[in-house]
Image: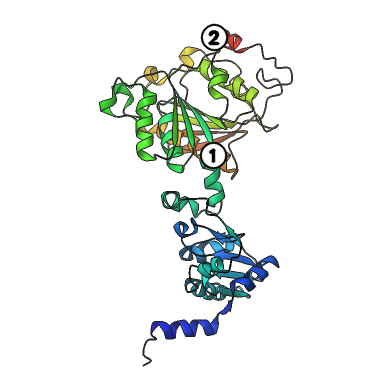
């Protein structure tokens, strides 16, 4: 029976099976088209990495390498902190069928010592640790996390829909959240508006929400606008943001949002709930094929056909489900990934636990975005809604 190899013998055996390159030779290979993979952990790469290197932690190499480089004939170079983990990474790549693999001798420490080009770490240690699971997604990574940090999202309403949306946008690292709401916390809110607490009954919802969000993620800048959305402030409240999450509970506010987001060329992530059902969509005026809110509701329905939660009631978890779907759409829009719900209306029935998707094409005769549509001012929209 063979005795187990000691560590040094094991490393020697590994080096006999894996090609090693100096950092200078690795840089030359990279310039010729080789893929350089930094297999250190996210928090290690936060201090810097070779220019052009792809960050992929050693523990996730097998899971993600094929997404990053499916071509097994490309030269792949592995780099770590000192040159040991990269030997293991290179051996793993060989076993997976990658034909031209090498480990960088001395790792990042030698790379720095030799004065080779380094990309300064853009994520500090706290960021790398806080968003570690998200950073591992190839669709996010450091570049995506920086996009989130630079994003400015407005949320109309800090209630049923705004509460879950704000919590998850803050947790994801959206840099600035602006909460627009003039209401105060009531005990009847608490079964669904999970951002508030019993001790805060009577407090402004915006301030209560800010307390929860900053406790969850102190890195997020939460701005408060304790105002009701009106014709004379809608553009002022929305300007400077990348998108708006609609958590309104009335049609006049949504019609004002629809008009303002079209004029400001800003995506509107729509959500609504009633009793046991909810719906979500995205109206994005930056896209020529996108409908607007008035393609869905050309004019407000009668009050008896669209009661609010205080009149009709709502299952407490339902706004949570719809608000999380809205947060998901907002993150996709910020990151530029996936397929947003543009031109589609997603409906959810909690009693049957079914989702249904309905096509929502742009209406050429829409009074909001059609070719003959005329914007007569926000005051006119308020009067129009009041008349209905």
Q: In this orientation, does residue 351 appear?
A: no
Q: Badge 2, how many Cα within 10 Å: few under 14, some, many 20+?
A: few
Q: Position of residue 346 (x, y in %)?
A: 53, 34
**What residue is at 67 percent from the left and 70 percent from the top?**
28
Query: Where does the N terminus fall, quadrant-wise?
Result: bottom left
Residue lying furthest bottom: 1
The answer to which of 197 and 296 lies nearer the viewer is: 197
Picture disc at residue 388 = 2
**What residue is at 53 percent from the left and 22 percent from the top?**
237
**What residue is at 47 percent from the left and 74 percent from the top?**
84
Q: Position of residue 301 (x, y in %)?
A: 53, 15
Asked which secondary structure carries label 2, the reply is loop
Q: Which residue is mark 1?
A: 150
Q: Badge 1, how many Cα within 10 Å: few under 14, some, many 20+?
A: some
Badge nearest the viewer, 1 or 2: 1
The answer to which of 293 and 63 lies nearer the viewer is: 63
Q: Position of residue 102 (x, y in %)?
A: 59, 75
Query: Where does the C terminus fall, quadrant-wise?
Result: top right
| Sequence-first tag of 1 and 2 | 1
Asked which secondary structure carries label 1, the reply is helix
Q: Position of residue 279 (x, y in %)?
A: 50, 30
Q: CA distance from mark 1 to mark 2?
A: 40 Å
Q: Is residue 172 above or below residue 104?
A: above
Q: Is residue 54 above or below residue 375?
A: below
**Is 236 left, or right, of 9 in this rendering?**
right
Quadrant of res 289: top right
**What residue is at 54 percent from the left and 73 percent from the top?**
90
Quadrant of res 338: top right
Quadrant of res 30: bottom right
Residue lying furthest left: 199
Q: Are marks 1 and 2 in contact (CB under 8 Å)?
A: no
């Amino acid at each position: 029976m063979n005795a187990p190899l000691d560590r040094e013998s094991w490393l020697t055996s590994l080096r006999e099976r894996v090609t090693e390159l100096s950092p200078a030779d690795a840089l030359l290979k990279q310039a010729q088209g080789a893929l350089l993979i930094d297999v250190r952990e996210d928090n290690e790469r936060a201090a810097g990495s070779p220019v052009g290197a792809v960050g992929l932690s050693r523990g996730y190499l097998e899971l993600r390498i094929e997404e990053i480089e499916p071509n097994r004939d490309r030269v792949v170079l592995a780099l770590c902190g000192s040159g040991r983990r990269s030997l293991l990474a290179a051996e793993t790549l060989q076993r997976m069928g990658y034909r031209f693999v090498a480990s960088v001798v001395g790792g990042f420490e030698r790379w720095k010592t030799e004065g080779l080009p380094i990309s300064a770490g853009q994520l500090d240690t706290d960021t790398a640790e806080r968003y570690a699971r998200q950073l591992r997604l190839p669709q996010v990574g450091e570049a995506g996390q920086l996009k989130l940090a630079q994003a400015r999202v407005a949320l109309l309403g800090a209630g049923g829909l705004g509460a879950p949306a704000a919590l998850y946008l803050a947790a994801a690292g959206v840099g600035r959240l602006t909460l627009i709401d003039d209401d105060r916390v009531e005990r009847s809110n608490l079964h669904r508006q999970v951002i508030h607490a019993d001790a805060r009954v009577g407090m402004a919802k915006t301030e209560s929400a800010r307390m929860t969000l900053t406790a969850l993620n102190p890195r997020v800048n939460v701005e408060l606008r304790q105002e009701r959305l009106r014709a004379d402030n809608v553009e002022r409240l929305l300007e400077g943001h990348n998108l708006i999450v609609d958590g309104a509970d009335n049609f006049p506010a949504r019609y004002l949002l629809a008009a303002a987001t079209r004029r400001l060329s800003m995506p509107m992530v729509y959500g609504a709930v009633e009793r046991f059902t909810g719906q979500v969509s995205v109206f994005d005026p930056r896209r020529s094929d996108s409908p607007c809110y008035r393609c869905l509701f050309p004019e407000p329905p009668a009050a008896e056909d669209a009661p609010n939660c205080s009149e009709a009631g709502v299952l407490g978890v339902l706004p949570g489900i719809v608000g999380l779907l809205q947060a998901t759409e907002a993150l996709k829009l910020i990151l530029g990934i996936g397929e947003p719900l543009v031109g589609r209306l997603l409906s959810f029935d909690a009693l049957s636990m079914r989702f249904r998707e309905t096509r929502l094409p742009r209406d050429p005769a829409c009074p909001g975005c059609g070719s003959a549509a005329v914007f007569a001012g926000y005051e006119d929209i308020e009067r129009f809604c009041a008349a209905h």
